[in-house]
Image: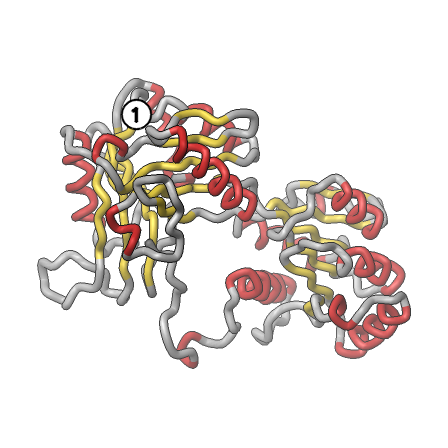
Amino acid sequence: MRDVMEPLLSWWTEGRAAAVATVVATHASAPRRPGAAMLVGPAGEAVGSVSGGCVEGAVYELGREALAGAPPVLQRYGVSDGGAFEVGLTCGGTLDVFVEKVDRRSFPQLAEVAETVRAGRPVAVATVIAGPPERLGRRLVLLPDRVAGSTGSERLDRLVRQDARALLEAGRSSVLRYDARGACRDGDPDAAGAGIRVFVESFAPPPRMIVFGAVDFAAALARTGSLLGHRVTVCDARPVFATAARFPGAWEVVVEWPHRYLRAEAEAGRIDGRTALCVLTHDHKFDVPLLEVALRLPDVGYIGAMGSRRTHLDRWDRLTAAGLTEAELKRLCSPIGLDLGAQTPEETAVSIVAEIIATKGGGSGLPLTDRPGAIHPDQGL
Protein backbone atom coordinates (compact mmCIF):
# COMPACT_ATOMS: atom_id res chain seq x y z
CA MET A 1 0.00 0.00 0.00
CA ARG A 2 3.00 2.28 0.39
CA ASP A 3 3.00 3.18 -3.33
CA VAL A 4 -0.64 4.37 -3.28
CA MET A 5 -0.73 5.80 0.24
CA GLU A 6 -0.93 9.48 -0.72
CA PRO A 7 -3.90 9.36 -3.14
CA LEU A 8 -5.73 7.00 -0.77
CA LEU A 9 -5.12 9.38 2.14
CA SER A 10 -6.34 12.32 0.05
CA TRP A 11 -9.72 10.68 -0.57
CA TRP A 12 -9.89 9.46 3.04
CA THR A 13 -9.26 12.98 4.33
CA GLU A 14 -12.08 14.31 2.14
CA GLY A 15 -14.43 11.71 3.63
CA ARG A 16 -14.66 9.71 0.41
CA ALA A 17 -14.21 5.97 0.04
CA ALA A 18 -11.86 4.07 -2.30
CA ALA A 19 -11.42 0.41 -3.06
CA VAL A 20 -8.01 -1.03 -2.27
CA ALA A 21 -6.76 -4.19 -3.98
CA THR A 22 -3.63 -5.54 -2.28
CA VAL A 23 -1.34 -8.36 -3.36
CA VAL A 24 -1.16 -10.56 -0.26
CA ALA A 25 0.65 -13.62 -1.64
CA THR A 26 2.45 -14.72 -4.80
CA HIS A 27 3.52 -18.06 -6.20
CA ALA A 28 6.22 -18.77 -8.81
CA SER A 29 6.75 -15.99 -11.40
CA ALA A 30 4.13 -13.50 -10.24
CA PRO A 31 5.01 -9.94 -11.32
CA ARG A 32 4.41 -8.01 -8.06
CA ARG A 33 5.39 -8.60 -4.46
CA PRO A 34 3.09 -8.75 -1.40
CA GLY A 35 2.03 -5.22 -0.49
CA ALA A 36 1.69 -3.96 -4.07
CA ALA A 37 -1.66 -2.24 -4.40
CA MET A 38 -4.16 -0.75 -6.82
CA LEU A 39 -6.88 1.77 -6.00
CA VAL A 40 -10.27 2.33 -7.54
CA GLY A 41 -11.15 5.90 -6.62
CA PRO A 42 -14.55 7.38 -5.81
CA ALA A 43 -14.94 8.64 -9.41
CA GLY A 44 -13.69 5.40 -10.94
CA GLU A 45 -10.01 6.39 -11.11
CA ALA A 46 -7.48 3.54 -11.31
CA VAL A 47 -4.22 4.16 -9.45
CA GLY A 48 -1.36 1.70 -9.02
CA SER A 49 -0.97 -1.89 -10.16
CA VAL A 50 -1.18 -5.43 -8.80
CA SER A 51 0.12 -7.34 -11.81
CA GLY A 52 1.68 -4.99 -14.34
CA GLY A 53 -1.40 -5.25 -16.55
CA CYS A 54 -2.33 -8.95 -16.65
CA VAL A 55 -5.38 -8.88 -14.35
CA GLU A 56 -5.93 -5.18 -13.71
CA GLY A 57 -9.26 -5.14 -15.57
CA ALA A 58 -10.74 -7.91 -13.44
CA VAL A 59 -9.39 -6.38 -10.22
CA TYR A 60 -10.85 -3.02 -11.24
CA GLU A 61 -14.31 -4.58 -11.51
CA LEU A 62 -13.95 -6.12 -8.05
CA GLY A 63 -12.98 -2.70 -6.76
CA ARG A 64 -16.09 -1.13 -8.25
CA GLU A 65 -18.21 -3.83 -6.64
CA ALA A 66 -16.56 -3.14 -3.28
CA LEU A 67 -17.35 0.57 -3.62
CA ALA A 68 -20.96 -0.37 -4.39
CA GLY A 69 -21.23 -2.32 -1.14
CA ALA A 70 -19.90 -5.80 -1.87
CA PRO A 71 -18.04 -7.44 1.04
CA PRO A 72 -14.25 -7.78 1.00
CA VAL A 73 -13.02 -10.64 -1.18
CA LEU A 74 -9.82 -12.67 -1.52
CA GLN A 75 -9.33 -13.56 -5.20
CA ARG A 76 -6.71 -15.81 -6.76
CA TYR A 77 -5.45 -15.27 -10.31
CA GLY A 78 -3.46 -18.03 -11.98
CA VAL A 79 -2.11 -18.93 -15.38
CA SER A 80 -4.29 -18.20 -18.40
CA ASP A 81 -4.31 -20.55 -21.39
CA GLY A 82 -3.97 -17.61 -23.73
CA GLY A 83 -7.65 -17.17 -24.60
CA ALA A 84 -8.42 -13.70 -25.89
CA PHE A 85 -10.87 -12.86 -23.08
CA GLU A 86 -9.49 -15.01 -20.26
CA VAL A 87 -8.30 -13.37 -17.06
CA GLY A 88 -4.98 -14.72 -15.83
CA LEU A 89 -1.24 -14.25 -15.60
CA THR A 90 0.82 -14.90 -18.69
CA CYS A 91 4.04 -15.19 -16.66
CA GLY A 92 3.25 -18.61 -15.22
CA GLY A 93 2.65 -17.50 -11.63
CA THR A 94 -0.27 -17.12 -9.25
CA LEU A 95 -1.39 -13.98 -7.46
CA ASP A 96 -3.68 -13.62 -4.42
CA VAL A 97 -5.38 -10.25 -4.17
CA PHE A 98 -7.53 -8.92 -1.32
CA VAL A 99 -10.07 -6.27 -2.37
CA GLU A 100 -11.85 -4.08 0.18
CA LYS A 101 -13.53 -0.70 0.59
CA VAL A 102 -11.52 1.75 2.67
CA ASP A 103 -12.96 4.85 4.31
CA ARG A 104 -12.84 6.61 7.66
CA ARG A 105 -15.08 4.02 9.29
CA SER A 106 -13.27 0.91 8.06
CA PHE A 107 -9.72 2.27 8.55
CA PRO A 108 -9.77 5.07 11.14
CA GLN A 109 -6.01 4.79 11.72
CA LEU A 110 -4.99 5.51 8.11
CA ALA A 111 -3.83 9.10 8.69
CA GLU A 112 -1.68 8.05 11.64
CA VAL A 113 -0.21 5.17 9.62
CA ALA A 114 0.64 7.53 6.76
CA GLU A 115 2.28 10.05 9.09
CA THR A 116 4.32 7.32 10.76
CA VAL A 117 5.52 6.03 7.38
CA ARG A 118 6.47 9.57 6.29
CA ALA A 119 8.47 10.00 9.50
CA GLY A 120 10.45 6.84 8.76
CA ARG A 121 9.16 5.04 11.84
CA PRO A 122 8.06 1.37 11.81
CA VAL A 123 4.39 0.44 11.60
CA ALA A 124 2.57 -2.76 10.65
CA VAL A 125 -1.02 -3.21 9.48
CA ALA A 126 -2.55 -6.66 10.05
CA THR A 127 -5.78 -7.25 8.10
CA VAL A 128 -8.07 -10.28 8.26
CA ILE A 129 -8.32 -11.53 4.66
CA ALA A 130 -10.00 -14.91 5.20
CA GLY A 131 -12.25 -16.29 7.91
CA PRO A 132 -15.73 -15.56 9.27
CA PRO A 133 -17.48 -12.96 7.07
CA GLU A 134 -17.96 -10.56 9.96
CA ARG A 135 -14.18 -10.37 10.48
CA LEU A 136 -13.08 -9.75 6.90
CA GLY A 137 -11.30 -6.43 6.60
CA ARG A 138 -10.90 -5.96 10.34
CA ARG A 139 -7.42 -4.85 11.21
CA LEU A 140 -4.87 -4.43 13.95
CA VAL A 141 -2.36 -1.59 13.60
CA LEU A 142 0.99 -1.76 15.39
CA LEU A 143 2.14 1.82 15.81
CA PRO A 144 5.46 2.77 17.47
CA ASP A 145 3.81 3.63 20.80
CA ARG A 146 0.57 1.65 20.83
CA VAL A 147 -1.65 -0.93 19.16
CA ALA A 148 -4.97 0.17 17.63
CA GLY A 149 -7.94 -1.72 16.21
CA SER A 150 -8.83 -5.39 16.55
CA THR A 151 -9.28 -8.57 14.54
CA GLY A 152 -12.49 -9.24 16.48
CA SER A 153 -10.93 -11.62 19.00
CA GLU A 154 -8.77 -10.73 22.01
CA ARG A 155 -6.99 -14.08 21.82
CA LEU A 156 -6.22 -13.64 18.13
CA ASP A 157 -5.16 -10.03 18.74
CA ARG A 158 -2.51 -11.21 21.19
CA LEU A 159 -1.13 -13.76 18.73
CA VAL A 160 -1.18 -11.35 15.79
CA ARG A 161 0.59 -8.65 17.82
CA GLN A 162 3.43 -11.05 18.59
CA ASP A 163 3.72 -12.46 15.08
CA ALA A 164 3.37 -9.09 13.35
CA ARG A 165 6.10 -7.55 15.48
CA ALA A 166 8.48 -10.29 14.36
CA LEU A 167 7.64 -9.60 10.71
CA LEU A 168 8.04 -5.85 11.21
CA GLU A 169 11.48 -6.29 12.79
CA ALA A 170 12.50 -8.33 9.74
CA GLY A 171 10.94 -5.81 7.33
CA ARG A 172 8.73 -8.54 5.81
CA SER A 173 5.09 -8.63 4.72
CA SER A 174 3.40 -12.02 4.87
CA VAL A 175 0.24 -14.00 5.57
CA LEU A 176 -0.30 -15.51 9.03
CA ARG A 177 -2.60 -18.51 9.38
CA TYR A 178 -4.68 -19.42 12.42
CA ASP A 179 -7.45 -21.92 13.12
CA ALA A 180 -10.74 -20.99 14.72
CA ARG A 181 -9.21 -21.38 18.20
CA GLY A 182 -6.36 -18.99 17.40
CA ALA A 183 -3.68 -21.66 17.05
CA CYS A 184 -1.15 -20.86 14.35
CA ARG A 185 -0.98 -23.20 11.38
CA ASP A 186 1.87 -21.53 9.59
CA GLY A 187 3.37 -23.87 7.04
CA ASP A 188 0.15 -25.90 6.65
CA PRO A 189 -1.86 -23.92 4.07
CA ASP A 190 -4.29 -26.74 3.28
CA ALA A 191 -5.29 -27.19 6.90
CA ALA A 192 -5.68 -23.44 7.30
CA GLY A 193 -8.09 -23.14 4.41
CA ALA A 194 -11.11 -23.08 6.72
CA GLY A 195 -9.39 -21.00 9.37
CA ILE A 196 -8.41 -17.34 9.67
CA ARG A 197 -5.73 -15.70 7.55
CA VAL A 198 -4.22 -12.34 8.39
CA PHE A 199 -2.07 -10.32 6.00
CA VAL A 200 0.61 -8.30 7.77
CA GLU A 201 1.99 -5.42 5.74
CA SER A 202 5.18 -4.10 7.27
CA PHE A 203 6.16 -0.49 6.76
CA ALA A 204 9.70 -0.69 8.08
CA PRO A 205 12.00 2.32 7.78
CA PRO A 206 14.10 2.32 4.60
CA PRO A 207 17.11 0.01 4.80
CA ARG A 208 20.40 1.76 5.39
CA MET A 209 23.38 1.85 3.09
CA ILE A 210 26.56 3.28 4.59
CA VAL A 211 29.23 4.15 2.04
CA PHE A 212 32.70 4.64 3.49
CA GLY A 213 35.04 6.75 1.39
CA ALA A 214 34.18 10.11 -0.19
CA VAL A 215 35.27 9.13 -3.71
CA ASP A 216 33.64 9.41 -7.14
CA PHE A 217 32.40 5.82 -6.90
CA ALA A 218 30.66 6.78 -3.66
CA ALA A 219 28.74 9.59 -5.40
CA ALA A 220 27.41 7.17 -8.02
CA LEU A 221 26.61 4.53 -5.40
CA ALA A 222 24.74 7.06 -3.24
CA ARG A 223 22.51 7.98 -6.20
CA THR A 224 21.88 4.34 -7.13
CA GLY A 225 21.26 3.23 -3.56
CA SER A 226 18.81 6.08 -2.98
CA LEU A 227 16.98 5.19 -6.19
CA LEU A 228 16.47 1.67 -4.83
CA GLY A 229 15.01 2.97 -1.58
CA HIS A 230 18.03 2.94 0.74
CA ARG A 231 18.75 5.71 3.20
CA VAL A 232 22.34 6.41 2.19
CA THR A 233 25.05 7.77 4.48
CA VAL A 234 28.49 8.71 3.14
CA CYS A 235 31.22 8.71 5.78
CA ASP A 236 34.83 9.86 5.47
CA ALA A 237 37.36 11.29 7.91
CA ARG A 238 38.48 14.01 5.46
CA PRO A 239 36.28 17.12 5.70
CA VAL A 240 37.53 18.59 2.43
CA PHE A 241 36.03 15.63 0.55
CA ALA A 242 33.06 14.67 2.74
CA THR A 243 30.66 17.48 1.83
CA ALA A 244 26.96 17.48 1.05
CA ALA A 245 27.63 19.34 -2.20
CA ARG A 246 29.69 16.43 -3.52
CA PHE A 247 27.05 13.84 -2.60
CA PRO A 248 23.58 15.20 -3.41
CA GLY A 249 22.21 11.65 -3.63
CA ALA A 250 23.04 10.88 0.00
CA TRP A 251 20.65 11.30 2.91
CA GLU A 252 23.54 12.48 5.07
CA VAL A 253 27.29 13.03 4.86
CA VAL A 254 29.32 12.38 8.01
CA VAL A 255 32.86 13.55 8.77
CA GLU A 256 34.34 10.95 11.10
CA TRP A 257 36.82 8.11 11.15
CA PRO A 258 34.86 5.22 9.58
CA HIS A 259 35.47 2.66 12.32
CA ARG A 260 34.46 5.12 15.04
CA TYR A 261 31.27 6.04 13.21
CA LEU A 262 30.28 2.42 12.59
CA ARG A 263 30.98 1.40 16.18
CA ALA A 264 28.86 4.28 17.48
CA GLU A 265 26.00 3.45 15.11
CA ALA A 266 26.09 -0.21 16.13
CA GLU A 267 26.12 0.66 19.83
CA ALA A 268 23.12 2.94 19.24
CA GLY A 269 21.20 0.06 17.63
CA ARG A 270 21.12 1.63 14.17
CA ILE A 271 22.74 -1.31 12.32
CA ASP A 272 20.57 -4.31 11.51
CA GLY A 273 20.12 -7.23 9.14
CA ARG A 274 18.99 -4.94 6.31
CA THR A 275 22.02 -2.62 6.50
CA ALA A 276 24.53 -2.63 3.64
CA LEU A 277 28.11 -1.52 4.40
CA CYS A 278 30.15 -0.54 1.34
CA VAL A 279 33.83 0.15 1.94
CA LEU A 280 35.27 2.13 -0.98
CA THR A 281 38.34 3.63 0.71
CA HIS A 282 40.79 0.86 -0.42
CA ASP A 283 43.29 2.39 1.99
CA HIS A 284 44.32 0.03 4.78
CA LYS A 285 44.60 2.77 7.41
CA PHE A 286 40.85 3.38 6.96
CA ASP A 287 39.39 0.08 5.87
CA VAL A 288 41.22 -2.40 8.12
CA PRO A 289 40.04 -0.82 11.43
CA LEU A 290 36.60 -0.38 9.86
CA LEU A 291 36.34 -3.99 8.72
CA GLU A 292 37.50 -5.20 12.13
CA VAL A 293 34.33 -3.60 13.51
CA ALA A 294 32.04 -4.53 10.61
CA LEU A 295 32.93 -8.22 10.39
CA ARG A 296 32.35 -8.69 14.12
CA LEU A 297 28.86 -7.22 14.07
CA PRO A 298 26.30 -9.91 14.93
CA ASP A 299 23.68 -8.77 12.42
CA VAL A 300 24.33 -6.89 9.17
CA GLY A 301 22.93 -7.52 5.72
CA TYR A 302 25.96 -6.97 3.49
CA ILE A 303 29.63 -6.07 3.84
CA GLY A 304 31.59 -5.29 0.68
CA ALA A 305 35.03 -3.75 0.15
CA MET A 306 36.51 -2.26 -3.01
CA GLY A 307 40.00 -3.04 -4.23
CA SER A 308 42.09 -5.15 -6.57
CA ARG A 309 42.89 -8.81 -5.95
CA ARG A 310 46.24 -7.71 -4.54
CA THR A 311 44.55 -5.20 -2.23
CA HIS A 312 42.11 -7.90 -1.14
CA LEU A 313 44.89 -10.36 -0.24
CA ASP A 314 46.81 -7.69 1.66
CA ARG A 315 43.63 -6.69 3.49
CA TRP A 316 42.88 -10.34 4.32
CA ASP A 317 46.36 -10.80 5.82
CA ARG A 318 46.05 -7.64 7.92
CA LEU A 319 42.61 -8.66 9.22
CA THR A 320 43.87 -12.16 10.02
CA ALA A 321 46.76 -10.62 11.96
CA ALA A 322 44.19 -8.50 13.82
CA GLY A 323 42.57 -11.71 15.08
CA LEU A 324 39.55 -12.14 12.80
CA THR A 325 38.50 -15.73 12.23
CA GLU A 326 38.01 -17.38 8.86
CA ALA A 327 34.24 -17.47 9.45
CA GLU A 328 34.22 -13.72 10.08
CA LEU A 329 36.35 -13.03 7.01
CA LYS A 330 34.03 -15.08 4.81
CA ARG A 331 31.28 -12.54 5.47
CA LEU A 332 33.24 -10.04 3.36
CA CYS A 333 32.37 -9.55 -0.32
CA SER A 334 35.69 -8.52 -1.82
CA PRO A 335 36.42 -7.39 -4.44
CA ILE A 336 33.03 -5.71 -4.20
CA GLY A 337 30.26 -6.19 -6.76
CA LEU A 338 29.18 -8.67 -9.42
CA ASP A 339 31.14 -9.26 -12.61
CA LEU A 340 29.21 -7.06 -15.05
CA GLY A 341 32.21 -5.72 -16.94
CA ALA A 342 31.69 -2.36 -15.22
CA GLN A 343 34.08 0.48 -16.06
CA THR A 344 32.55 3.79 -15.00
CA PRO A 345 31.56 4.78 -11.45
CA GLU A 346 27.89 4.47 -12.45
CA GLU A 347 28.38 0.98 -13.88
CA THR A 348 30.35 -0.02 -10.79
CA ALA A 349 27.51 1.25 -8.60
CA VAL A 350 25.09 -1.00 -10.52
CA SER A 351 27.40 -4.00 -9.98
CA ILE A 352 27.52 -3.29 -6.23
CA VAL A 353 23.77 -2.91 -5.74
CA ALA A 354 23.25 -6.02 -7.89
CA GLU A 355 25.39 -7.97 -5.42
CA ILE A 356 23.48 -6.47 -2.49
CA ILE A 357 20.17 -7.53 -4.07
CA ALA A 358 21.50 -11.02 -4.80
CA THR A 359 22.79 -11.39 -1.24
CA LYS A 360 19.48 -10.30 0.25
CA GLY A 361 17.32 -12.40 -2.05
CA GLY A 362 19.54 -15.46 -2.29
CA GLY A 363 20.09 -14.94 -6.02
CA SER A 364 22.87 -16.65 -7.95
CA GLY A 365 23.91 -13.62 -10.01
CA LEU A 366 23.64 -15.74 -13.15
CA PRO A 367 21.71 -14.64 -16.25
CA LEU A 368 18.11 -15.83 -15.97
CA THR A 369 18.57 -17.38 -19.42
CA ASP A 370 21.02 -19.86 -17.88
CA ARG A 371 18.98 -20.55 -14.74
CA PRO A 372 16.28 -23.25 -14.76
CA GLY A 373 13.12 -23.15 -12.67
CA ALA A 374 10.89 -20.35 -11.44
CA ILE A 375 12.16 -16.78 -11.61
CA HIS A 376 10.56 -15.66 -8.34
CA PRO A 377 10.29 -17.54 -5.03
CA ASP A 378 6.83 -18.27 -3.63
CA GLN A 379 5.29 -15.82 -1.17
CA GLY A 380 2.28 -18.06 -0.80
CA LEU A 381 -0.75 -18.66 1.32
Residue 176 x/y as whole percent: 39, 46
The reply to whether residue 188 is visible in this rendering is: yes
Q: Quadrant of the C terminus?
A: bottom left
> Label 1 amino acid?
Ser
Q: Quadrant of the N terminus?
A: top left
Residue 339 x/y as whole percent: 59, 75
Where 109 falls versus 285 (above or below)?
A: above
Residue 54 x/y as whole percent: 23, 56
Q: Residue at x 19, y 42 (%)?
A: 60
Q: Residue 158 falls in which quadrant of the image? A: top left
From the viewer's perspective, tell me whether residue 9 is left or right of residue 77. Answer: right
Where 112 falls versus 87 (above or below)?
A: above
From the viewer's perspective, tell me whether residue 267 is left or right of residue 352. Answer: right
Residue 170 x/y as whole percent: 54, 48
From the viewer's perspective, tell me whether residue 14 is left or right of residue 293. Answer: left
Disc 1: which residue: 106
Residue that extends furthest to the bottom in the rendered view of this protein: 370
The reply to whether residue 220 is visible in this rendering is: no
Instruction: Give the secondary structure at mark 1.
Output: loop
